[in-house]
């Protein structure tokens, strides 16, 4: 059977005849024979044995393709439970968030009964992630709550539970308090050397801050955003969102300071259009209309050309393959660099890129594998990799296309918001003139002071245009407020 | 986060004129009345393109550096908080840089307790393992048979002071890929120091000889810079002036009359210990041999020192280069 040639697109489409399964130990030198046996018919046992052998030889992706073929035969196949367990393990090896979890999620619920406790729990966690993406939140919650606290992946599953509980679409409404407890549980876990665990902790910290913001506990949210480690993948996002939290907490200077960090040369190629809109809004709420317009001008200068460059890609009939090519090849990409970085740095994109890299690695290994040289297995496996590469690129391309369209939509939306702010600023200025208020005099009478120091263990520096790496994230603005009496716009 | 659009729209709505009622509730105007004689407003025109900001409003990497209405600051947590921490400082060599009639080189140590971030209490100690009259003073003696007044050439053997340290200014700089933080420090203290006077220089006749001139009040003023190197270490470079008052009226506890009695006894060929001296006079310091030289020969030299009582305020200005461990 040419299982792998069919590719992942066919996974889970149906079950075929069952086949006798013998618990074959990994035979790293028997790949050609197992391949020939597996090719002869619907021999689930041979396919699973081939999967084990391929994994042992360092081909986890190809291994997963053959176990996927076993799953296609359905639970009636004797090798089905073993293949399922093996796939759960391979998912962990490959760190694949899409293909294998989707395949596992397509299996009947009864399939879990034959699994040993740990793979069963892990499968529940993986399929919960799929449920979350599909919007089946109640189902996801049930599965995540069933994950034992001592599971090796409990940090990830607890974080995901928090995400589910804080989702506004959760039946009965979001449970922010419970979500916060879940994130706190992750943060209280003992630190580990594992980078994946640390990544989960980082995400939990960000999610905690967002939850506090959603609960309108703004001061705590600010603290939570500040607790996010510097120079981690979430840092820029945390700085931006901290700006919102500070603004809502009534600290416009702090909010502008948080946003200032995003305009440092170190973040030059980052995609932060909303930061300018928020800056303009903060100035508007302090009746500093010239400053608001300056921010909008900066937004316009930076992001309107980007929007124009994205328009033909986002509006046109960009195929997933073309979208993937735009992201995969930065040298030839037509995407503006900040958008390219933003799209490529997406967690999901990174994982798909990693999967694509794994396919390349296995292809190279296959070409250099002397034990398979000149055999039918080598040709067949190479063909399987080529076919699956197309599938992965298709997934990546779809994600890339979505990302490009999202960037364009965001820019369009922010451009509209910029127009509204501009209109409101002009209107407010006109009102002041009509009432005979001389805003210049009001501003001239105002004073600028140093910001309050949180304590003696803080250094103060006057910012004069130099961006020191250690200072990023510690900027504070002081600004005058030109609003007179009831002119101050009201925050809703 | 998209709440700002909503907020602005709401703010806009709040300021706007009352909206038209829904179409279903609009009553037709009475037929007898003409509509008001108003000219319909023209359709809204799109906003003109934004103008570049003025020089005052111009941004540098997003920062309004010249805007009189806005200022940007940095309020940064100190990389290494010091409050409540001890610092142990060692100055291996402290050369005197203002040696005129005297020359001192020593080793000093300091225990600093950072009571606050920029204010500390200090306990300072110094031992001068080299404390001699300067070659200039010795040259005066050799060539013109003159020498500095006794008080002006007093030597400081050791000192112990308690004091305070403040760091009113701080800064940082990049050194290759590392950020070095520094602070200017001022210190002051008070304590005691042990002094002596050189009676005879080291020459062919024997090594130098000294007479103890007592323990004196010692003051300390200093300024310097402290470079923080990581969390646990720091380098310090500065100058300190160890100030002490000097009035020489006794040598080895012996007053002028004691010394004359000792000298008379010495000239008479008697034992110095049988001379009539005050209780504080350490006769044994003039007895015995120092190498091949009789210590009794120091008695007339000591008389010269106290014969014309002198006083002075001396300052031993030294360079202090040291390293410290922050505990």
Image (cartoon, helix red, strand yellow):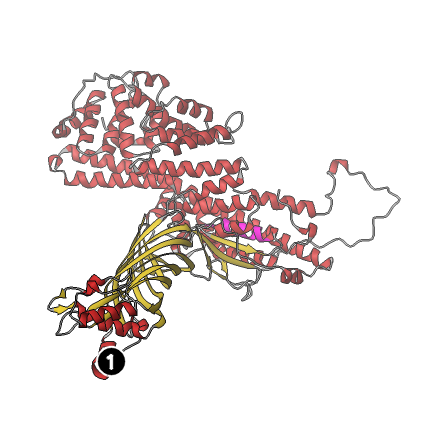
Q: Which residues are magenta?
A: A272-283
- How many discs appear? 1
Percent position (x, y) of residue A328?
33, 47
Q: Is residue A308 positioned above or below A366 on the image?
A: below
The kind of secondary structure the magenta stretch mainly shows is helix
Q: Is residue B314 left or right of residue B272?
A: right
* Label 1: chain letter: B
* Nearer the observer, A8 or A88: A88
**Going by the picture, which residue comes out furthest to the right?**
B32
Judge from the rendering whether residue A203 lies leftward or rightward of residue A218; answer left or right.
Answer: left
**Foreground residue among A487 and A108:** A487
- Whether residue A165 is in magenta: the answer is no
Above or below, A40 against A304 in this view is above
Q: Which residue occupies the foreground of this view, B234 or B136?
A: B136
Instruction: Tell me where residue A308 appears, x and y as whole percent.
Output: 48, 54
Q: Quadrant of residue B228?
A: bottom left
Which residue is drawn at the image coordinates 28% and 34% (left, top)?
A: A94
- The percent coordinates of residue B105 (x first, y second) are 25, 65
Viewer can see residue B98: no
Tell me the element at label 1: helix
Identify the residue shown where x is 39% and y is 59%.
B189
Q: Is residue B34 visible?
A: yes
Left or right: B227 in relation to A259:
left
Q: Residues within 10 Å of mark 1 (few under 14, many from 20)?
A: some
Q: Which residue is mark 1?
A: B140
């Amino acid at each position: 059977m040419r299982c792998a040639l069919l590719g992942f697109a066919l996974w889970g489409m149906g079950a075929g005849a069952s086949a006798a399964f013998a618990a074959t130990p990994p035979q790293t030198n028997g790949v050609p024979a197992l391949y020939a046996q597996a090719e002869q018919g619907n021999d689930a046992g041979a396919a699973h044995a081939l999967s084990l052998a391929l994994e042992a030889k360092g081909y986890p992706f190809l291994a997963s393709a053959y176990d996927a073929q076993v799953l296609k035969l359905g639970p009636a196949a004797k090798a089905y439970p073993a293949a399922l367990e093996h796939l759960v393990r391979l998912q962990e090896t490959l760190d694949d968030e899409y293909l294998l979890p989707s395949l596992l999620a397509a299996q009947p619920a009864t399939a879990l009964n034959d699994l040993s406790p740990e793979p069963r729990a892990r499968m529940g966690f993986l399929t919960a992630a799929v449920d979350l993406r599909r919007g089946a939140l109640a189902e996801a919650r049930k599965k995540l709550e069933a994950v034992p606290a001592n599971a090796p992946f409990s940090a990830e599953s607890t974080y995901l539970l928090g995400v589910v509980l804080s989702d506004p679409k959760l039946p009965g409404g979001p449970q922010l308090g419970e979500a916060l407890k879940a994130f706190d549980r992750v943060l209280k876990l003992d630190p580990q050397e594992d980078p994946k665990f640390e990544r989960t902790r980082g995400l939990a910290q960000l999610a905690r801050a967002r939850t506090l913001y959603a609960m309108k506990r703004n001061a705590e949210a600010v603290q939570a955003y500040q607790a996010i480690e510097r120079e981690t993948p979430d840092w820029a996002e945390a700085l931006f969102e901290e700006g919102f939290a500070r603004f809502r907490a009534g600290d416009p200077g702090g909010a502008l300071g948080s946003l200032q960090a995003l305009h440092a040369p170190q973040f030059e190629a980052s995609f932060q259009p909303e930061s300018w809109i928020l800056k303009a809004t903060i100035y508007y709420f302090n009746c500093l209309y010239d400053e608001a317009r300056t921010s909008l001008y900066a937004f316009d200068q930076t992001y309107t050309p980007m929007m124009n460059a994205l328009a033909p890609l986002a509006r046109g009939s960009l195929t997933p393959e073309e979208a993937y090519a735009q992201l995969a090849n930065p040298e030839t990409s037509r995407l503006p660099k900040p958008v390219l970085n933003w799209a490529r740095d997406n967690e999901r994109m990174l994982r798909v890129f990693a999967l694509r890299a794994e396919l390349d690695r296995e292809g190279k290994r296959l070409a250099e594998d002397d034990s398979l040289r000149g055999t039918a297995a080598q040709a067949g496996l190479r063909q399987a990799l080529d076919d699956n590469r197309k599938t992965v690129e298709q997934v990546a391309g779809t994600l890339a296309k979505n990302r490009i369209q999202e960037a364009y939509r965001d820019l369009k939306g922010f451009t509209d918001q910029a127009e509204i702010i501009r209109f409101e600023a002009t209107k407010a200025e006109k009102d002041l003139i009509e009432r005979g208020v001389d805003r210049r005099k009001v501003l001239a009478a105002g004073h600028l002071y140093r910001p309050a120091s949180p304590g003696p263990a803080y250094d103060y520096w006057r910012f004069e245009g130099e961006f020191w790496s250690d200072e990023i994230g510690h900027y504070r603005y002081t600004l005058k407020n030109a609003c007179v009496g009831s002119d101050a716009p009201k925050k809703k | 986060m998209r709440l700002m659009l909503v907020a602005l729209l709401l703010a806009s709505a709040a300021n706007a004129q009352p909206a038209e009622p829904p179409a279903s509730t609009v009553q037709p105007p009475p037929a007898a009345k003409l509509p008001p004689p108003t000219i319909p407003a023209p359709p809204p025109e799109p906003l003109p393109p934004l103008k570049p900001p003025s020089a005052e409003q111009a941004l540098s990497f997003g920062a309004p550096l010249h805007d009189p209405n806005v200022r940007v600051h940095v309020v940064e947590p100190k990389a290494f908080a010091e409050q409540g921490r001890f610092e142990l400082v060692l100055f291996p060599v402290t050369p005197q840089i203002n040696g005129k009639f005297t020359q001192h080189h020593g080793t000093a140590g300091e225990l600093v307790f950072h009571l606050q971030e920029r204010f500390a209490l200090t306990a300072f100690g110094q031992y001068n393992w080299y404390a001699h009259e300067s070659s200039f003073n010795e040259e005066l003696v050799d060539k013109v048979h003159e020498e500095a007044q006794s008080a002006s050439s007093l030597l400081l053997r050791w000192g112990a002071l308690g004091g305070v340290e403040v760091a009113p200014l701080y800064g940082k700089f990049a050194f290759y890929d590392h950020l070095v933080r520094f602070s200017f420090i001022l210190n002051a203290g008070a304590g005691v120091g042990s002094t002596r006077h050189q009676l005879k220089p080291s020459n062919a006749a024997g090594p130098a000889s000294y007479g103890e001139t007592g323990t004196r009040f010692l003051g300390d003023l200093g300024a310097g810079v402290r470079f923080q190197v990581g969390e646990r270490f720091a380098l310090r470079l500065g100058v300190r002036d160890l100030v002490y008052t000097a009035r020489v009226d006794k040598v080895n506890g012996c007053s002028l009359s004691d010394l004359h009695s000792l000298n008379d006894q010495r000239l008479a060929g008697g034992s110095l210990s049988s001379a009539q001296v005050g209780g504080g006079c350490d006769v044994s310091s003039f007895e015995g041999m120092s190498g091949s030289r009789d210590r009794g020969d120091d008695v007339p030299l000591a008389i010269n020192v106290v014969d014309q009582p002198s006083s002075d305020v001396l300052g031993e200005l030294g360079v202090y280069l040291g390293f410290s461990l922050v505990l």
